[in-house]
């Protein structure tokens, strides 16, 4: 089961805030911290990869690319319990690009 701190970090943009929310309830009952973090990162990937491609990849296309481009394997190597979403996003998508620029 997902920890409350991780759930709040993942759902920080949720318009329901302190009210009951179906999505939060669903996440709490079905997923662990690692699964929720990976789904959120796939959702982030879908957004920026679709923007780069000029069309919506859809979740199936985003998941396929996420795996094929090595992000799933990289996630498995960097994920540690308790990591915040922003830190995972940075390590997965941003850190390597910044190192190449230097």
Image: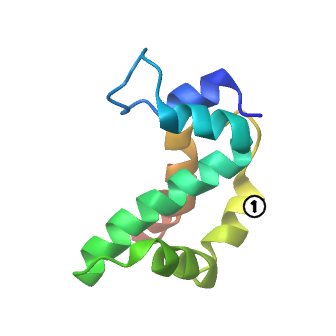
Give the quarter of the image for residue 38.
Answer: bottom right
Name the one closer to the observer, 83 or 67: 67
Q: Is residue 35 above or below residue 21?
A: below
Q: Secondary structure at mark 1?
A: helix
In the image, 42 versus 83, the foreground residue is: 42
For residue 38, above or below residue 14 = below
Tell me how many marks there are: 1
Q: Which residue is at the far top?
A: 18
The residue that disc 1 covers is 76
Furthest-left residue in view? 54
Mark 1: give few (<14), some (14-19) or many (20+) Cα within 10 Å: few
Residue at position x 42%, y 29% in the image = 12
- Is residue 98 visible in the rendered structure shown here? no
Q: Residue at x 66, y 69 (%)?
A: 72
Residue 3 falls in which quadrant of the image? top right
* Above or below, 47 relative to 91: below
């Amino acid at each position: 089961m997902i920890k409350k701190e991780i759930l709040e970090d993942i759902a920080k943009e949720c318009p329901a805030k302190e009210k009951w929310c179906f999505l939060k309830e669903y996440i709490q009952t079905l997923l662990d911290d690692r699964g929720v973090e990976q789904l959120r990162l796939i959702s982030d990937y879908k957004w920026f990869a679709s923007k780069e491609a000029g069309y919506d990849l859809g979740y199936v296309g985003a998941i396929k690319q996420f795996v094929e481009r090595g992000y799933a394997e990289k996630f498995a190597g960097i994920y540690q319990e308790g990591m915040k979403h922003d830190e995972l996003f940075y390590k997965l998508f941003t850190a390597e690009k910044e190192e190449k620029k230097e």
